[in-house]
Image (cartoon, grey):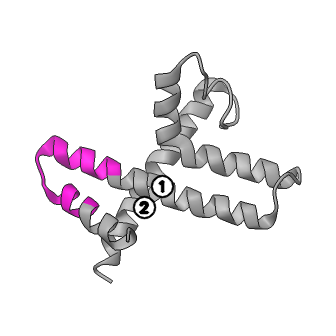
Amino acid sequence: MSLLLPVLFAFAVGLTACGLTGSVMELAAGRRLAFAEPYVSPAYILRSLVATACAGPFMLANDALDARREGRISTLMLVSCGCTVIAWALALGIVLIAIASWGIGSPGALQLLVETLARYLP
C-alpha cells in the first residue's frame, strides 16, 4: 500500500490542478472547456500549450463526452479517452509535484518521478 500512496497523491494533485484550471478558464471565458477557440488558438501558441497542458484532461473529457452523446465515438473509444485522462492527470500531478519540490529544494519529487516512471515504463 505504501508504494501506491505516492501515485495516488500525484493523481490527486493532477486532477485537482486540472479541475481548478479548467473551472477558472470556463468562468473567465463563459464557455464550456474544449479543444477549440478561445482556449486553443493557432494565433496564441504558447497560451494554448499552457492551457492544454494544465486543463487538457478536463478538455479531453468534455470533448469525449460530447462526441459520445452525438454518436461520433463508440463506448470503447470513450473508455480509451477516460484512460488517457487518468494517465494525463497522473503525469500532470508528477510534474507539478516535481516543480513544487524543486522550488523549495527538496529532492523528494525527483525521486518520486524516477520511481513512478521506472514502475510504468519498460
Q: On the rendered image, what quadrant is the C terminus found in? A: bottom left
Q: Farthest residue toward the bottom?
A: 1
Nearer to the camera, 114 or 25: 114
Residue depicted at 34% across the width and 55% down the height: 94
Place residue 109 in its image quadrant: bottom left
Q: Position of residue 107 (x, y in %)?
A: 13, 55
Query: Where 5 sits versus 28, above or below?
Result: below
Nearer to the camera, 15 or 82: 82
Q: Is residue 21 magenta?
A: no
Q: Farthest residue toward the front?
A: 122
Q: Position of residue 42 (x, y in %)?
A: 60, 21
Q: Secondary structure at mark 1?
A: helix
Q: Mark 2: which amino acid?
A: Phe
Q: Position of residue 48 (x, y in %)?
A: 53, 28
The first of marks 1 and 2 along the sequence is 2
Q: Which mark is residue 89?
A: 1
Query: In this image, 33 relative to 88: left or right?
Result: right
Residue depicted at 63% across the width and 61% down the height: 82
Q: Which mark is residue 11?
A: 2
Residue depicted at 50% across the width and 60% down the height: 87
Total marks placed: 2
Q: Are marks 1 and 2 in contact (CB under 8 Å)?
A: yes
Query: Where 107 sits versus 7, above or below?
Result: above
Q: On the rendered image, what quadrant is the N terminus found in? A: bottom left
Q: Is residue 101 magenta?
A: yes
Give the Cα separation between the discs numbered 1 and 2. 6 Å
Q: What kind of secondary structure does the magenta stretch mostly adopt?
A: helix
Mark 2 burial class by Cα count in 10 Å: few <14, some 14-19, many 20+: many
Q: Which residues are magenta?
A: 95-113
Q: Which mark is residue 120?
A: none
Q: Position of residue 23 (x, y in %)?
A: 57, 39
